[in-house]
Amino acid sequence: MGNALGRSRALFCRALARIPGGVNSPVRAWRAVGREPLFIDRGAGPYVFDVDGNRLIDYVGSYGPAILGHAHPAVVAAVAEQASRGFGYGAPCEGEVNLAEELSRAIAPAEKVRLMSSGTEAAMTAVRLARAATGRSKILKFDGCYHGHSDGLLVRAGSGGMTFGVPDSAGVPQQLAAHTLVAPYNRLDVVEQCLSANRGEVAAVIVEPLAANMGVVRPRAGFLAGLSALAHSFGALLICDEVITGFRLRYGAVSEVYGAAPDLILLGKIIGGGLPIGAVGGRAELMELLAPCGPVYQAGTLSGNPVCVRAGLATLAALKRPGVYERLEALGAQLESGLSQALAETRTTGCVNRAGSLLTLFLGVSQVADAEAARGADALKFSRFFSAMIEAGVYLPPSQYEALFVSLAHSEADLAHTIEAASRALRVAAGG
Ligand SMILES: *Cc1c(COP(=O)(O)O)cnc(C)c1O
């Protein structure tokens, strides 16, 4: 990274005066890596350019939506075409129907789909639906899984999975958090104990079928099939949160590949092509509990926004071309093997967890299968690694606990540069 950071610094100063922490979403402040954030001016393909003119290879990918790379011409054209006819009308439009049909075709359990403006709303709506459908109040989530920032879902484990949830955020009433049970990811035995101790009270089990918000953590063989069976045997619904995984690992959802039988599926990120979106899909009779058919209220001024749905449709059309997911798998595999080799060469303790184009390099731990193991990672070393990568022109997510997102725009040469940089950055990080 050649240029000084004068403009980023000046903008951050102004931002701090008027925006809490200078950012509109906390991780963007780079506090976990002890630096000030870069302000981004534009993105093109696999790169972002900061306001000081530095070009960086981007693995944040807008936290998932940018699977085609930035400013893909087909998506830009679709957005421009729709924008010229207005941004939204507060009335139904054809694009919403096209997107709902496409999602339903790709994801069998999503017989009907309701579109909204964020993944947070999707998770919130699904929980409300599950409570209405079952007449129960509690939900069971997993430590380290993220389902947006609605009150009842901002809860992770205390020390044990069986304990009542402790609010993760100030401002969440204890009585509300008490409706959220937390179990460790990949632990069916704890799930069973938990459901059994709360028999007849749990409305839904909500899970990321492949966890990507504690860093990437794959489900153990049989975990999701077992979870489905357990949830259903206790009369609870299974909500699979595929806001990250949907259309990221294959064209559609991954839950079915892992043997899960979700009652509700949550989508977001990729299906909006980079513009704000969220969606809940499920069996028709369940989805028809939503207003105006049923008694569960849910609404949104910008829900099913015509520009967002066009961006989503254009993105899905590009993802439907043959070979796309094979290409993403090959790129992910190249990055995984390169980073693993860099760990070995530099004698660094660490591990690479990967699924397709989602990947996390954990430092300081040799295996991660749940949040507790992830918390054992060396965050300080990661922050030194992160900084050295920025200096080398590689933009990683600014936290040990986020996934790297590889896009279709990344080339083998971009990845080779990244791996070389990582090898050097690991040596710097070891230096302390
Ligand atoms: C990003 C994310 C959400 C929240 O989506 P927003 O659009 O940020 O509200 C929910 N669940 C998962 C798994 C996510 O990765």
Image: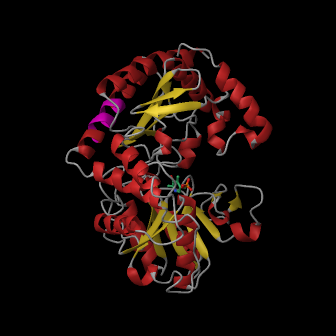
Residue beneath the point at 38% across and 28% down: 340
Residue beneath the point at 51% across and 62% down: 88
* Quarter containing the C terminus: top right
Q: Is residue 226 left or right of residue 33?
A: left
Q: Is residue 78 left or right of residue 278?
A: left
Identify the main secondary structure in magenta: helix
Rendered position, 405 above or below 55: below
Rendered position, 105 above or below 382: below
Q: Position of residue 325 (x, y in %)?
A: 27, 46
Q: Is 399 or 63 nearer to us in this picture?
A: 63
Name the residue furthest front: 84
Count of numbered circles on the image? 0
Q: Position of residue 226 (x, y in %)?
A: 39, 67
Q: Magenta stretch containing residue 112, yes or no?
A: no
Q: Is residue 406 visible?
A: yes
Residue beneath the point at 37% across and 38% down: 407
Q: Is residue 363 visible?
A: no
- Which residue range is magenta in the image? 329-336
Q: Quadrant of residue 285?
A: bottom left
Name the residue furthest left: 322
Q: Is 44 or 250 nearer to us in this picture?
A: 44
Q: How is the image coloured?
A: secondary structure
Q: Position of residue 172 (x, y in %)?
A: 74, 62
Q: Magenta stretch containing residue 334, yes or no?
A: yes
Q: Position of residue 193 (x, y in %)?
A: 54, 70
Rendered position, 64 above or below 260: above
Q: Is 267 or 271 nearer to us in this picture?
A: 271
